[in-house]
Amino acid sequence: MYKILSIIFLFGVQNALAQVTPNPKVTKKSTQDTFINKIEITDDYTVVSMQYVSKSPKEALKEYLDNNPKEKEQLGRMNPMMRNMLLQQMMGGMGGSTISIQPTSFLRSKDGKEFDFIKASNIPVAPERQNVEPDKKYFFKVFFEKLSPGIKSVDLVEGPNDERDGFQYWNFYGVEVNNPALGETQALAAIPENPAEEFIMSGKVYDAATEKPIAAKITCTIEGDNVPFDSVMTSRTGYYEFLVKPDSYVYKIEADGYALTTENMNLSKVTKSFDRDIFLEPLVEETPQEEIAEVIEEPVKEEELEEVDENTFRLKNVYFPLGKADILEESHKELAKVVRMMNENPEMEIRVDGHTDNQGDSRLNMILSMDRAKNVRDYLIAEGIEAKRITFKGWGDTKPIEKNQSKEERQKNRRVEIVIINE
């Protein structure tokens, strides 16, 4: 099945066509599954061409197990034959996800000015959603209000948080945009009374991922006609050129290993030769089944607890809100290791020790450390560990492991430790 992809242009004539930023540089983004291929500033909109790459069954299974440490732990205990059979069944049930774009999305410049969402193509607008198949690419465009001249960096904000209520939002920060201020824009040459009958359009075809030139076949058709009037086959250098008249054209670009690409181009007002480079995106390669099987057959392993000495373990990934004792969800994976250790050693008894830094009132620090240690104990009991096997103690700021002279040192002093008191 062919997909219509984006073409990226570099123009030698300013203002004859939309202002384009191919593969814009992004400082930070909320997900590795979505990409910005191109940004165009037209007469009416800022058009962001994007692609979403859905996870393969293998990737989806790995993500599920990473987010469900108890199930991952249980799988690790099974005999290899049973584990592989169950993993195969689980991977077979890994369906595709869904995608949409939020109508509250906007572009935001560095000075805080916002440019609202207008519409989208090839993707539904929430609350409507589109099912996507595993290991596939999906291309779509999002239209925003036109950026003011001179804005050269924006954030694309789809949601107030990168993730909320089970949804992953597509947020991009520090996206560079080719959008010169009015004084920087080259003035369009006056259209002569007798415009040129023909002009040369030339450029190169590149791999969008590697930026290396590739050989391709380019077919040119006047818009509205069914029969191409010209076609060229580029060399390995990717270079091509057409002799064309001012008109509207449809270009079709084909290359081995790349999806068929088409694009409309209105050249009716172009009066002299110019360059146009084309960037093609490679097709997604299917993961061989034998490779998947090899990965599944590997035992599922968990990192061990950090050992301080033979009787003490530090829980380096247990987190609490500042000044509070509530256990954050990010801590569950680390606490699952304690549950596993105690299940594997049914006679083991432990003490949960809470520690703070020296900031604030020492009496309050003592209470806070005790509350945090108690909440860890309560969590372990809720996971099935007998209450009589766990005690707790708060030490406040009385047992620092660093000098409390820097932010990093104080962070290390804020900790929870497990002390084995009987095996």
Image (spheres, helix red, strand yellow):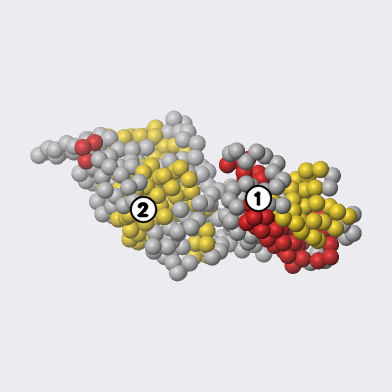
Sequence-wise first label, 1 or 2? 2
Q: Position of residue 130 (x, y in %)?
A: 49, 65
Point 81% across, 61% down: residue? 390
The label nearer to you, 1 versus 2, is: 1
In which image quadrant can residue 77 be found? Answer: bottom right
Q: Position of residue 103 (x, y in %)?
A: 39, 64
Give SS at disc 1: loop
Label 2 crowding class (10 Å Cα cut-off): few <14, some 14-19, many 20+?
many
Disc number at residue 415? none
Instruction: Tell me: 115 left or right of 74.
Output: left
| Closest to the observer, 68 or 291 | 68
Q: Are marks 1 and 2 in contact (CB under 8 Å)?
A: no
Residue 373 at least partly seen: yes
Quadrant containing the C terminus is bottom right
In which image quadrant can residue 412 be found? Answer: top right
Amino acid on which disc 2 is placed: Leu
Q: Position of residue 275 (x, y in %)?
A: 31, 35
| Closest to the observer, 226 or 417 | 417
118 shown above or below 207: below
CA distance for labels 1 and 2: 42 Å
Give SS at disc 2: strand
Amino acid on which disc 1 is placed: Thr
Point 84% across, 52% down: residue? 420
- Residue designated by label 1: 356
Residue at the far left in the pictured view: 193
148 shown above or below 100: above
Residue 78 at least partly seen: no
Disc number at residue 107? 2
